[in-house]
Image: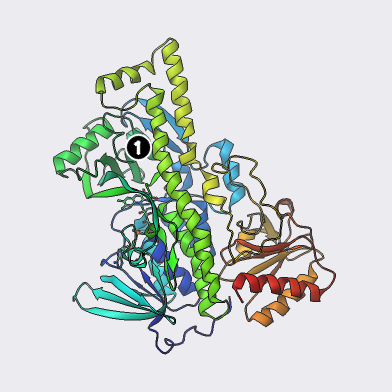
Amino acid sequence: MPAGPLDNTPASPGYDTDVLIAGSGPAGGSMALLLATYGVRVKMITKYGQLADTPRAHITNQRTVEVFRDLGIEHLLQREATPWELMSNTTYCTSLAGQELGRVPSWGTNPRRHADYLLASPCTMVDAPQTIVEPILVSQAQARGAKVRFDTEYLGHEQDADGVTTTARDRLTGTEHTVRSRYVVGADGARSKVAEDLGLPFEGPGAVAGALSIVFEADLSRFVAHRPSVLYWMLQPGADEHGVGLGVLRMIKPWTEWMLIWGYDPAAGPPDFTDAFIRDLAVKLVGTDDFEMRVSSRAPWTINHHFATSISKGRVFCAGDAIHRHPPNNGLGSNTSIQDSYNLAWKLAHVIKGLAGPSLLDSYDAERAPVARQVVERANKSIADTGRILEALGLSDTSDPGKLEERLAVLRAPGQDGEKTREAMREAIAYKSYEFNAHGVEHNHRYASGAVDPDGTPMPAFTRDPDLYAQPTTWPGAKLPHAWVTRDGVRVSTLDLGGKGAFTLFTGIGGQVWAQAAAAVSAQLGLDLPVVFIGPGQAYEDPYGTWAGLREIADDGAILVRPDLYVAYRVTSAPASADEATTQLGRALRAVLGR
Ligand SMILES: Cc1cc2nc3c(=O)[nH]c(=O)nc-3n(C[C@H](O)[C@H](O)[C@H](O)COP(=O)(O)OP(=O)(O)OC[C@H]3O[C@@H](n4cnc5c(N)ncnc54)[C@H](O)[C@@H]3O)c2cc1C
């Protein structure tokens, strides 16, 4: 995207900033960084005096790492995160020292699944708690020009035809002030005041369970280093009540820092978090008292089943937990929040710079509200699926410890019952791939909105389970497929050739008319429109033939890719003349931009 008219200029008369963001979590932090990168004046206010002080969301999927890559900061994340190979198991047991029930090879590390992940993205998955992710996002946002104000609480807003006036309180002095902006983004988390003020419609039962999170340091290497996992799930009496399905020990730092998760009844409220209570719980889940621990934080939180069916109103947009509230199962929390921002930021930038009509912003609701519903339903279903593990033992709950012990013993016993129970347990644990290998949930979104210009073809049917398997396509509304191509022999991802705040046109041999069309349309609309040629003898070569196998167009066809790397429009082959190509491309881009 070219430097817009507003870059490096003082605030336009009547505005303090272009976009005001409430909240500095994964949604707000990434929104601030993306907007600052795109050259938009942005101010982020956040309620507390610091970023996340507890690890919270941690599974960082390939889609999120792709956003970091597009922003040029993938290396900062990789430097601090726990690498993919240490995420390779999810272990079910009675305690770390106790009976192991089985493992799920996780997050695409199973050799059977690994290729699927490598084929879908140039990026790996990593484990990066919010204590790592937020400082990277926010410091980079500041370095690129975003203004950040801590200890500042969003109180309310009023919008009119030209902008939004937000009232905020400085929590250090108690004074209130107003901020006038063109747009507001409410990224203020699960108790979003912005969403409440907008009166966004929500569906779902709301709070469904309670969980305690206790972060502690303890060297537990001897129990875990031989079966590296991000999550160790404990089947014990009471572990299935409330909470996230079972008791959990979650790795924060291998293998010396942990988060313990245990359920509580939200109607009764959280129990008293005494040191003795915490120690007892930790000893129960580790399975021995032969370890030292130092507790660094303890907090109750609520597990929700709640999503907004409409996520914006006028000039105010909500993102992240403000619009989708769900359990951590499937690791979709901060990932989805960052994707919300990736979807909205380029649209705001284009509208603010006068490169798109305001109707482009309507596509945020059309594209991301269905995702909010999908992730909330998926994560809650994963809690329910954990019930299969109990069912495999022939139990409906763990209320009778004697019975539980008896059935666990059967898993190790000879005879028909043992054999049947073992088979059922293997199936129940393998089924958890829907939680730990749900690659399709992460990659298979197909947007339908004004920001996509359909080509009249039906959406390609999924050939494998769409929750488990990513299926690339260039069908308008799908994410640009990743393929390794080469420049001067050096490999580069197709995803690296687009993004960076701009639209990109992909074509190949015989597609010269598209280069002429792109130059003409770029001049007409006043935006950059780089053209990427892929093929033998072109700027980028396709020596593996992967791109040719994925692109679903002829050599001389064209694929118009949005700044968020989704396909906006495609044409199977080149028209007879550059004029015709210009007409086609200009019409499509105008339609997408709402101009
Ligand atoms: C204890 C806990 C454990 C979790 N564990 C996991 C996990 O393991 N995996 C997972 O995927 N998800 C987990 N989650 C959920 C995950 O943290 C969220 O999905 C993710 O943080 C959402 O990002 P967000 O930016 O939308 O909201 P948040 O990260 O909640 O950020 C909200 C921001 O808004 C600010 N704010 C709030 N109110 C105001 C206001 N009025 N004015 C200004 N600023 C305001 C806050 O200070 C904060 O900066 C957990 C959540 C909690 C609470």
Residue 390 figure quarter: top left
Q: What x and y, as percent, mark residue 569? A: 67, 64
The quarter of the displayed image where residue 254 is located: top left
Answer left or right for 146 relative to 96.
right
Position of residue 49 relative to residue 226, above or below, is below
Report the side of 291 relative to 66 (left or right): left
Number of marks drawn? 1
Residue 595 percent across, percent down from the top left: 61, 77
Residue 35 shown left or right of residue 217 in the figure = right
* Residue at image coords 75%, 75%: 582
Secondary structure category for the residue under label 1: loop
Is residue 157 at all visible to an observer of this figure? Answer: yes
- In the rendered image, the vertical position of residue 302 relative to residue 225, given as above or below: below
Residue placed furthest toward the right: 576
Visible residue check, residue 229:
no
Q: Name the foreground residue: 326 vs 122.
A: 326
The colour scheme is rainbow
Q: Quadrant of ligand 1?
A: bottom left
Residue identified by numbered label 1: 245
Q: Nearer the viewer, residue 488 or 4?
A: 4
Q: Relative to the observer, which residue lies in front, 338 or 373?
A: 373
Amino acid type at mark 1: Gly
- Residue at 21 percent across and 47 percent down: it is 295
Tell me residue 369's x, y (percent): 48, 58
Q: Position of residue 281 (x, y in %)?
A: 22, 36
Q: Residues within 10 Å of mark 1 (few under 14, many from 20)?
A: many
Q: Residue furthest top?
A: 415
